[in-house]
Image: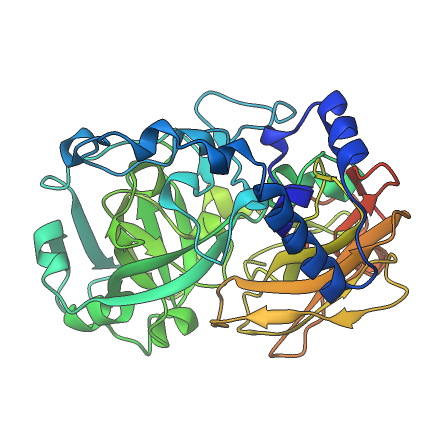
Amino acid sequence: MLSRFIQRAPENFLSRDQMQAVRAGRRGFLAGAVAAAAGAMAADRADAQGDPNILNLPPHSKALGQPVAARGYGLPSEWEKNLQRRESPGLTRVSQSSVSFCPLQGLFGIITPSGLHFERHHQGWWDLDPSKHRLMLNGSDDAMLKRPMVLSMDELMRLPPVSRMHFIECGANTGMEWGNVAVPTVQYTHGMLSCSEFTGVPLRTLLELCGADFKRGKFVLAEGADGSGMTRTIPMSMVMDGQVLVAYGQNGEMLRPENGYPLRLIVPGVQGVSWVKYLRRIELGDMPYATKDESIHYMDLMPDGLHRQYTSIQEVKSVITSPSGGQVLLDKGFHTVTGLAWSGRGKIKRVDVSVDGGRNWKAARLEGPVLSKCLTRFNSDFVWDGKPAFFQSRAVDETGHVQPTYGELRKVRASRSIYHNNAIQSWALEENGEVKNVQL
């Protein structure tokens, strides 16, 4: 199988001695992608003739397995236990405010398993009793909503649901790269990113039930029930198209506690801090609320020292997840370059891949489905000749926005910012097969 020629997850590295032994014993590949693939498969068949794993019947083929009751809730294989969310030792941790990064390098497709979904907590997570949780809808004055309501989870879940797949990205994702801090792996450069199928009720539906005055109401305030008192302003223009959801479901089951159980806001295309978790209140108003997390955080520091506020859209972006930093190509020949692309403005239209640091580009294959404000998987063929290479991906969305280089981005944003870094990521492949994070 071709997968044996790359170590995908950095947590599952071979030792250097093991890698040298593998390289020394690996037969050479034929030139070209198709020939390399065919040669590798033929080699596998030849090896199998004397492979003890084929000749000797293993214990699991001669005995009973575990009963159904042994796993009431399905768990990953023990052989996959090293693929997990991880905290960055380089980030300052204050009280319960913390981040865990999604292992993008080990995922397939576009959906993130709920148990690997990245975390961002401002005051820690809670496992709330859904029977006691309530959602209040009110107006900034009595005329905004004709019928203010307080809804239980049971009442919410009796309303007609919708399910949609969307990405969520923290506004600070890739933030450490602004200042040329080359963290080692894609899990730490881009791991505050995940994608799920969310189920819930459109916020517009709830406001209509309350008799909202959509002419006066220009913004909503979303408030969470955690200790940070997280509150965010959402423009009504995003609510009116029906995309903003009050969600209780994620990937076919209830939300996980660390992802806001039992209720959170889904604001497609917008930075994750606006996807308020443990949602308890929606207020309709006629102006932005300028809450603490909008007036002092999640703003862009511009070159002249001013802050750009309410820049919540996550711009077009992509990253190669394999080969990526910390991984090792174990031999020359055919490899698949794979990654993810996304845009807060709509669908991904095209992704180009370069293996020479941006001198030449080739259109990648977009793997379906390609959905609006959702992750899109791309793949591209690469035949390694043993020489150094520089991998890059460049995404274009349906609105015509093109992912910028660091040089282009810093011309307008300088290098002192933290949030909304959508610059092209570069990975350097060295002659020994090791892949490292670089900025070009």
- In the rendered image of this protein, does residue 84 appear above or below residue 274? above
Q: Residue at x 68, y 73 (%)?
A: 401
The residue nearer to you, when weighing 103 against 383, is: 383
Residue at (70, 45) in percent of width and height? 324
Q: Is residue 105 above or below residue 109?
A: above
Total label count?
0
In the image, what residue occupies the spot 42% across and 70% down? 238
Coordinates of residue 188 in the picture (x, y in percent): 63, 37
Q: Quadrant of residue 213?
A: bottom left
Give whichever of 103, 136 is nearer the camera: 103
Q: Is residue 144 above or below residue 331?
A: below
**Is residue 316 visible from the viewing direction of this image?**
no
355 left or right, relative to 183: right
Residue 202 in view here: yes
- Which residue is nearer to you in this view: 16 or 324? 16
- Could you say which quadrant of the image residue 34 lies in? bottom right
List x then y, in percent, for residue 381: 72, 63
- Give 394 or 17, whichever is nearer the viewer: 17
The residue located at (56%, 36%) in the rendering is 51
Q: Position of residue 291 (x, y in %)?
A: 45, 46
